[in-house]
Image: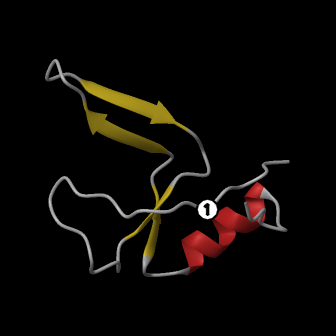
């Protein structure tokens, strides 16, 4: 596991200054009973320039952040 060496405010400043990223603050997914699960976390962002996605297919892997 890799831990990012910067604070949440630094992460959000980076995201807001990067035109290929968007700070959503939540993630959502459809679940088996046709409802939607939504999780809120201020550090969640979207890499909008990622070109390898398809509808309903997520990137594999993760970035783990220690929020201080």
Residue 8 picture quarter: bottom right
> Residue 31 at x, y = what percent?
24, 27
Residue in the foreground of this view, choosing between 51 and 68: 51
Residue in the foreground of this view, choosing between 22 and 28: 28
9 vs 60, left or right, is: right
> Residue 16 at x, y = what percent?
56, 71
Residue in the foreground of this view, choosing between 36 and 19: 36
Residue at 46% in and 72% down: 21
Secondary structure beneath dot 1 equals: loop
Q: Label 1, on which residue?
A: 63
64 vs 61, left or right, is: right
Question: What colour scheme has been applied to the protein in the rendered image?
Answer: secondary structure
Position above or below: 67 against 63: above
Residue at 53% in and 52% down: 44
Q: Quadrant of the N terminus?
A: bottom right
Residue at 57% in and 71% down: 15
């Amino acid at each position: 596991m890799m831990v990012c060496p910067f604070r949440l405010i630094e992460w959000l400043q980076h995201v807001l200054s990067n035109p290929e990223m968007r700070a959503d603050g939540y993630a959502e997914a459809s679940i088996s009973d046709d409802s939607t699960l939504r999780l809120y976390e201020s550090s969640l962002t979207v890499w909008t320039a990622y070109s390898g996605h398809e509808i309903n297919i997520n990137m594999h892997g993760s970035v783990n952040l220690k929020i201080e």
